[in-house]
Amino acid sequence: MANPNRVKVLHTGYSSTIIEEKDENLPFVRANCSCVLVTGSKNIIVDTMTPWDTNLILLSLEANGLIPDDINYVISTHGHSDHTGNNNLFLKAKHIVGYCISVKDKYFLHPFDKGLPFEIGEGITVIPTPGHTADDVSVVIKTEDMGTVVIAGDIFEREEDIEQPEIWRSCGSVNPEQQENSRALIANFADYIVPGHGPIFKVTDAMKKKLSENLSSCNQ
């Protein structure tokens, strides 16, 4: 590979299931997503956090020798507000939000709903992984130093939800059976997974077995 693909987590996501005191007469929890930079055959930013994180993203890009105009693709693994908040910084990029691909007012029709992947560049592919929402996507990156890395958004909340599936289920899923299938699919070929709200983790054989068992149990 002439220009090897690299994955760098700019911000590690987090979430809390603890309901805090009311603000604006509503109870709330605290959460923000993982934001990831991919460089190599293309420059990509995946999941741009909340609108209040603009400076964090700009400073992180600067630390990596980049500005927003250097980014070729912005990918939001799904359309929730903590994953799309700074998409408007990247006006020279092609945008993928869930199954939707667009530039300005042009919307490109790609059959994610038929299960077909979308190739961005050498060793970088976007695949449909529904479950958390109806049109989640994950980004698959082949690297020299880490093997295959999958940026999975909220299909995985964090590493602990493999042994404790109630974690991801409690965070919302429009189709838990689809999500179980997407989780098992990803783990089957990933060496590392970047979850939506936790640190990157290495996939083990034990994890693959557990996810396969969870899927079998779900299908019974």
Image: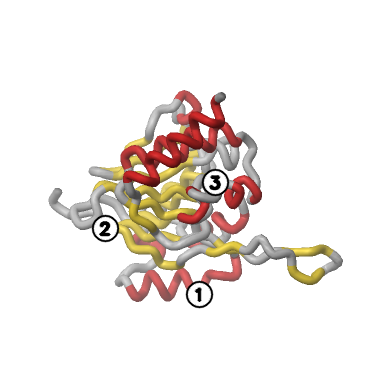
Q: Residue at x 46, y 24 (%)?
A: 114
User: Which quadrant of the figure has residue 17?
Assistant: bottom right
Q: Earlier in the sequence, mark 3 or mark 2?
A: 2
Note whether residue 20 is visible.
yes
Q: CA distance from mark 3 to mark 1?
A: 22 Å
Q: Name the residue that disc number 3 marks.
A: 78
| Front in this rendered view, residue 55 or 140 | 140
Q: Earlier in the sequence, mark 3 or mark 1?
A: 1
Residue at point 50%, 36% (across, down)? 214
SS at badge 1: helix
> Is 61 left or right of 198, judged from the image as shown?
left
Identify which amino acid the numbered label 1 is placed on. Asn
Q: Which residue is mark 2?
A: 6
Residue occupied by mark 1: 55
Q: CA distance from mark 1 to mark 2?
A: 23 Å
Is 72 rendered above or below residue 138? below
Residue 159 pos. (x, y %)? 46, 55
Residue 208 placement: quadrant: top left
